Image (cartoon, rainbow, N blue to C red):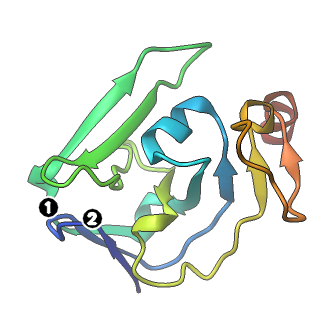
Amino acid sequence: MIQGGCLCGEVRFEVSRFTGPFELCHCPRCRKTSGSAFAAMVGVNTDEFRLLSGADKIRTYEAPLLRHPPLYCVAFCSQCGSPVPNPPAEGGFFEISAGILDDDPGLCPDKHIFVECKSEWFSITDALPQITLRELIELRRP
């Protein structure tokens, strides 16, 4: 099991397996919620996630809709402010901030996304693919 939790330790969880993708998102909303040049987000299926403690500490914020659903929703610990997982009630896939993991997720980042939005003060120097919004839409099209 891969363990993780918030800064104060109130919210704790475990994941049996991450499915990916493991994306480094440069969109303005992810930059603001991470407080960094990008948010490192790794995908997991809800049936492979288990909240161990702190459900009562989890709060969410739904940002106004920019283009089309789904909404941009972030979850955080109400005590320390760390981003925390908040799986969708209907099940399926969701993303967890990689920085709150205590253990190796068994995956490495596979791409940068929303690179057209990246901060001017940050340079991407690795060899990972750099995907724009338009390319991401094509990539995720069923």
Relative height, residue 101 to residue 36 (above, below): below
- Camera-nearest label, 2 or 1: 2
The type of residue carrying mark 1 is Gly
Residue that label 2 marks: 6
Q: How many C-alpha atoms fall within 10 Å of the one at disc 1: few (<14), some, or many (≥20)?
A: some
Helix, strand or loop at mark 1: loop
Q: Is residue 89 visible?
A: no
* Place of residue 89 in the rendered image (x, y in percent of width and height, measured from the top left): 33, 43
Residue visible at 72% across and 47% down in the picture: 122
The quarter of the displayed image where residue 133 is located: top right
Could you tell which of marks 2 and 1 lies nearer the N-terminus?
2
The type of residue carrying mark 2 is Cys
In the image, 127: left or right of 115?
right
Residue that label 1 marks: 54
Q: How many C-alpha atoms fall within 10 Å of the one at disc 2: few (<14), some, or many (≥20)?
A: many
Residue nearest the viewer, comparing 34 with 12: 34
Residue nearest the viewer, comparing 32 with 1: 32
Residue visible at 68% across and 59% down in the picture: 21
Tell me the CA gap for discs 2 and 1.
9 Å
Residue nearest the viewer, comparing 69 with 117: 117
Relative height, residue 80 to residue 107 (above, below): above
Residue visible at 66% across and 76% down in the picture: 107
* Place of residue 76 in the rendered image (x, y in percent of width and height, measured from the top left): 28, 47
